């Protein structure tokens, strides 16, 4: 089945690339999403079976795949809107639209592949493919900023991916010494206990540095920040959510290999350091940020830092990490979709050019408010629950000093986010001519309400299937 | 014999540290491609002919001929000044690259591995970090790309160390090399010129807080 | 003893061959190969003029310099034959006797009170400083490789077997040859024929020397060339019998001289600020030799 999925996806992407009609594009995009959902539903019923030799749908893959499919539908929908309204008076040229849709298709397909891959090299190849697609999409607006950001993204991600490859090579060396040349995750987890710790340490270090570019974690987070700034908002929504999930899955799978060896405490420390530094960097930069999308990007960095800390803490943290990733994906995606509508009102992403959003587009302002509640992990939202669980895990492991530091940093971040969001919603705009503000219909914000509703609903009333899936995903980790 | 080639490769890294002209970089890169061919030809005795041809293609055709010629073309076409414009004097570069080699050597002593020859490890990591160092301390985009290619060479050496047992990994690495080099070099170096319209490509540093 | 005599013999024609090569390459007939020695003899027949501002140091320095070079030559072995002086760790003695001579030539340059000479002295000191680790790492690697610590034993037990030893031999030759150029202030570090004091290194230090002293300094340069040539030759002599080693010795000396001549004809000297990095390359390369030796010994594989 994955084979059919990939073949069909490639065919559809090819059609998208060569089609030069708007209607055709929309039809093909709908077909692509149907394919994506069909595949997702198929995989739901073929849980834990190996397919095509290199793909297995386990708990991690299925969770992430469902999140991806939900977000690819919304992102496709908002992409159409974005391409309509990108320029003030005219729509994007059809050729650029075709490239955009084709790259979007590649991005979704590559992420699907990366989630499902059960072989360490297969994961790596698909992650590499996402870099390419994302770079093309970042370049979409063809400004100087766009070329700078996509160049940086491509270049740094290439170096990062090379690092990850070196990590895989080290892993393969240790596997060879342990007498196996099978690099599928299952075989690696089985043999991990006999691996040479030195190689494993090096491998983990290189892999975490490598994939941190994708996950937006500390050592290589800068590319993601720059990419967010210029990428089209629906794509930013991808880079900030599912693409970060891709990075997370890649790191998580390596972590699962490490988990059964003696170097687990060491790996945990690495994750804690990386996570803490991420939160620190994010908090510091959030205080002085002046661009909405950069602000959201730093907020993603902060959340990924929390995820890394949760993974490094262990215990109940493992469960919370997945919950947090799911909620963060939905929240951040709706924030980016909303930022696109903010941009349509103010024609600017700069915070100082905005204000009084309630007056111009009330549903949008509601979305912003809800996002603020979620992203700062205030009680009614699901992210409160996941973050609280991570903190509880830290408390149980007696990381009190670290916990206090993180809480202080999060408070700073919360203050900065609140300051900027409330300025957007309530403050009177400066030098803003409101006569040209177009009408935005409510249906364009509907997807955001649905996503945010999911965050609230899943937080308080998690369906049993989801709990089971997450427990399935973390079954190989020590309890 | 591979040891000899690898030592020469390391010396080329030292030379890279003090080279000031872009042309020298390109020559060093082509030379490294030849060395890599030698190493892989001698070392990879257990792989199939098809694989060997593939590696030949990678080292001789691609690394030694195509990429250097292409970089030459890019430099000429974009009228890039021929100096590498490092941020740090070459003397310090040399000291740092020497230090990198010493550190990787010391690090390699911590290994008690029987399946991999340590010299591969030392040379590969040295190339990796020397390449990164070049990327960090050189001003131009084209030198960044060259640093990246050096990093790729390091990865190639490391993958040779496991290549006999796992040709699949080796091929994946080589494909990565093709793919990225073409992508990074081809599309972007030309596109950047189109957008910026400057005779000399400056650093891209407008995006910041 | 034999090495001492042979090196003296080689020193007579060494600089001559360099000059002759350079003139042939540039299309001139050039002086005979004994011309430098004739010049030195002419200088030796003269008295010396001393500046009033100088002290006794300026007067004794050339002699000490010359003597130090002679001392160093006595240490150099010839294949399996010992030098006049030979003991454990004599390569350290070799390096520091030369350094002593250099030290005196530097302070004598400072003694004249000329700003040019001070500048030259500082450059010479800097370059020697950078060249020293290269020499010691190189000799240290050989000592490690052979397990011996005197020149004669090291060279007698050096033999080339595996392929890696050839590259080590080539690299060692390269490093030694380049140290020779640094120590003798030749191209590409310094141009002995330059006529601008600002760009000189060694030549500017001996501006005030004249007559007999100048002759000694010039002849010391010839001796040093022959001495390093002998070291390089020693790398290849191994334990062959005498009737083979003497031709090898002269062959390598002549080859080396021609190589120096060609190098000086075809390269431009480096910019002054590039010299330091160039000399440091020698240290880096000898470090690689050291690692290569570790590799050969299997301390590291």
Image: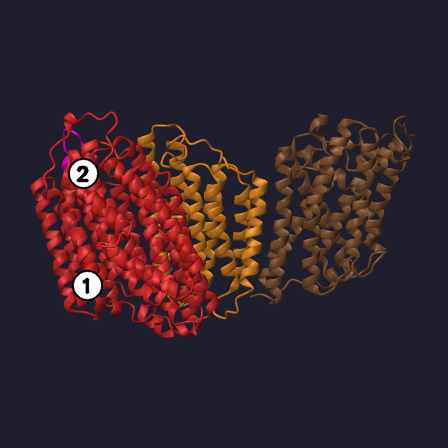
Q: Are marks 2 and 1 on the same chain?
A: yes
Q: Residue C73 at x, y = what percent? A: 82, 50
| Alpha carbon separation for disc pair 2 and 1 | 31 Å
Colour of chain A, in one word, is red
Colour of chain B, in one word, is orange
Is residue B132 one of those drawn in magenta? no
| Snapshot quadrant of residue B174 | bottom left
User: Is tag 2's residue or tag 1's residue first in the polypeptide sequence?
Assistant: 2
**Is B90 situated left or right of C142 in this image?**
left
Residue at 81%, 48% (x, y): give it.
C97
Q: What colour scheme was applied to this rendering of the protein?
A: by chain
| Snapshot quadrant of residue A361 | top left
Subunit of mark 2? A
Is residue A470 in view from this perspective? yes
SS of the residue at dot 2?
helix
Using a 10 Å C-alpha cutoff, classify the residue at mark 2 as few (fewer than 14 neighbours), some (14 to 19) or many (20 or more). Answer: many
**Is C220 situated left or right of A121 in this image?**
right
Residue at 77%, 46% (x, y): give it.
C226
Q: Residue C123 at x, y = what percent? A: 71, 36
User: CB of mark 2 within 8 Å of CB of mark 1?
Assistant: no
Subunit of mark 1? A
**Camera-nearest label, 2 or 1:** 1
Label 2 sits on residue: A341
Q: A392 or C72: nearer the eye?
A: A392
Above or below, C290 against C114 in this view is below
Q: Residue C90 at x, y = what percent? A: 80, 57
Magenta span of residues? A82-97
Chain ID for brown = C
Above or below, A349 against A476 in this view is above
Image quarter (top left, top right, bottom left or bottom right) of the C terminus of chain A: bottom left
Residue at 25%, 70% (x, y): give it.
A472
Label 1 sits on residue: A462
């Amino acid at each position: 089945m994955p084979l059919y999925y990939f073949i069909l996806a490639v065919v559809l992407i090819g059609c998208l690339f060569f089609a030069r009609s708007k209607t055709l594009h929309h039809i093909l995009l709908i077909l692509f999403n149907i394919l994506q959902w069909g595949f997702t539903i198929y995989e739901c019923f073929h849980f834990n079976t190996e397919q095509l030799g290199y793909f297995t749908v386990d708990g991690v893959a299925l969770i992430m795949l469902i999140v991806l499919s939900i977000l690819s539908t919304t992102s496709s929908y908002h992409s159409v809107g974005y391409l309509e309204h990108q320029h003030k008076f005219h729509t994007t040229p059809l050729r650029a639209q075709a490239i955009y849709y084709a790259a979007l298709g590649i991005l979704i397909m590559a992420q699907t592949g990366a989630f499902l891959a059960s072989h360490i090299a297969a994961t790596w190849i698909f992650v590499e493919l996402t870099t390419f697609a994302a770079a093309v999409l970042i370049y979409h607006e063809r400004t100087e900023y766009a070329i700078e950001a996509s160049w940086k993204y491509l270049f740094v991600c290439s170096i990062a991916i090379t690092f990850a490859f070196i990590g895989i090579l080290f892993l393969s060396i240790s596997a060879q010494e342990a007498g196996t040349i099978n690099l599928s995750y299952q075989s690696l987890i089985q043999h991990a206990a006999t691996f040479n710790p030195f190689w494993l340490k090096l491998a983990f270090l290189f892999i975490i540095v490598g994939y941190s570019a994708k996950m937006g974690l500390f050592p290589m987070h800068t590319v993601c920040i720059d990419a967010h700034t210029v990428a089209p908002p629906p794509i930013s929504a991808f880079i900030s959510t599912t693409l970060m999930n891709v990075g997370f899955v890649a790191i998580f799978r390596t972590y699962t290999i490490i988990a059964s060896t003696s170097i687990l405490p060491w790996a945990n420390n690495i994750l804690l350091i990386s996570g803490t530094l991420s939160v620190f960097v994010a908090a510091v930069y959030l205080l002085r940020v002046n661009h909405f999308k950069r602000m959201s990007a730093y907020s993603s960095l902060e959340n990924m830092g929390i995820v890394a800390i949760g993974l490094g803490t262990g215990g109940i943290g493992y469960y919370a990490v997945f919950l947090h990733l799911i909620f963060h994906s939905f929240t951040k995606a709706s924030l980016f979709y909303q930022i696109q509508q903010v941009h349509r009102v103010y024609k600017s992403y700069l915070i100082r050019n905005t204000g009084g959003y309630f007056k111009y587009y009330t549903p949008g302002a509601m979305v912003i408010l809800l996002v603020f509640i979620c992203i700062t992990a205030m009680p009614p939202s699901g992210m409160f629950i996941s973050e609280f669980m991570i903190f509880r895990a830290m408390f149980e492991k007696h990381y009190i000093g670290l916990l206090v530091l993180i809480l202080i940093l999060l408070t700073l971040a919360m203050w900065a986010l609140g300051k900027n969001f409330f300025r957007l919603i309530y403050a009177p705009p400066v030098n803003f001519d409101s006569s040209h503000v177009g009408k935005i219909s409510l249906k364009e914000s509907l997807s955001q309400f649905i996503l945010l509703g999911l965050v609230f609903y899943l937080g308080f009333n998690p369906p049993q299937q989801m709990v089971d899936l997450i427990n399935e995903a973390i079954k190989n980790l020590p309890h | 014999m591979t040891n000899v080639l690898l030592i020469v490769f390391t010396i080329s890294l030292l030379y890279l540290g003090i080279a000031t002209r872009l042309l020298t970089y390109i020559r060093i890169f082509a030379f490294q491609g030849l060395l890599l061919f030698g190493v892989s030809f001698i070392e990879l005795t257990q792989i199939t002919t098809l694989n060997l041809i593939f590696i030949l293609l990678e080292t001789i055709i691609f690394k030694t001929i195509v990429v250097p010629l292409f970089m030459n073309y890019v430099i000429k076409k974009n009228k890039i000044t021929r100096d590498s414009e490092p941020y740090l004097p070459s003397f310090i570069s040399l000291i740092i690259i020497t230090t990198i080699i010493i550190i990787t050597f010391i690090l390699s002593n911590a290994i008690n591995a029987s399946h991999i020859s340590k010299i591969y490890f030392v040379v590969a990591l040295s190339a990796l970090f020397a390449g990164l160092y070049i990327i960090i301390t050189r001003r131009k985009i084209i030198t960044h790309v060259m640093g990246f290619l050096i990093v790729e060479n390091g990865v190639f050496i490391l993958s040779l160390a496991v290549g006999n047992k796992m040709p699949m990994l080796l091929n994946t690495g080589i494909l990565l090399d093709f793919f990225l080099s073409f992508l990074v070099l081809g599309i972007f170096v030309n596109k950047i010129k189109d957008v910026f319209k400057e005779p000399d490509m400056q650093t891209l540093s407008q995006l910041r807080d | 003893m034999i090495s001492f005599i042979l090196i003296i013999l080689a020193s007579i024609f060494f600089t001559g061959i360099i000059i002759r090569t350079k003139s042939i390459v540039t299309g001139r007939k050039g002086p005979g190969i004994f011309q430098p020695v004739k010049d030195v003899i002419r200088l030796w027949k003269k008295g010396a003029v001393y500046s009033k501002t100088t002290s006794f140091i300026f007067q004794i320095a050339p002699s000490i310099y010359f003597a130090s070079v002679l001392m160093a030559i006595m240490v150099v072995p010839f294949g399996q034959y010992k030098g006049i002086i030979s003991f454990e760790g004599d390569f350290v003695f070799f390096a520091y006797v030369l350094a002593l001579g250099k030290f005196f030539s530097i302070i004598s340059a400072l003694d004249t009170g000329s700003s040019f000479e001070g500048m030259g002295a500082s450059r010479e000191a800097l370059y020697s400083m950078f060249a020293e680790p290269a020499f010691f790492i190189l000799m240290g690697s050989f000592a490690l490789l052979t397990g011996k610590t005197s020149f004669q034993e090291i060279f007698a037990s050096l033999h080339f077997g595996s392929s890696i030893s050839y590259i080590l031999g080539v690299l060692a030759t390269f490093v030694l040859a380049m140290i020779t150029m640094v120590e003798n202030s030749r191209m590409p570090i310094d141009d002995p024929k330059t006529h601008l004091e600002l760009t000189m290194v060694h030549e500017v230090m001996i501006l005030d020397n004249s007559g007999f002293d100048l002759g000694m300094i010039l002849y010391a340069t010839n001796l040093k060339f022959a001495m390093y040539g002998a070291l390089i030759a020693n790398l290849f002599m191994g334990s062959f019998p005498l009737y083979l080693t003497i031709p090898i010795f002269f062959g390598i000396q002549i080859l080396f001289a021609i190589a120096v001549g060609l190098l000086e004809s075809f390269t431009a000297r480096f910019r002054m600020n590039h010299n330091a990095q160039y000399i440091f390359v020698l240290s880096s390369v000898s470090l690689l030799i050291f690692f290569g030796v570790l590799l050969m010994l299997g301390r590291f594989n």
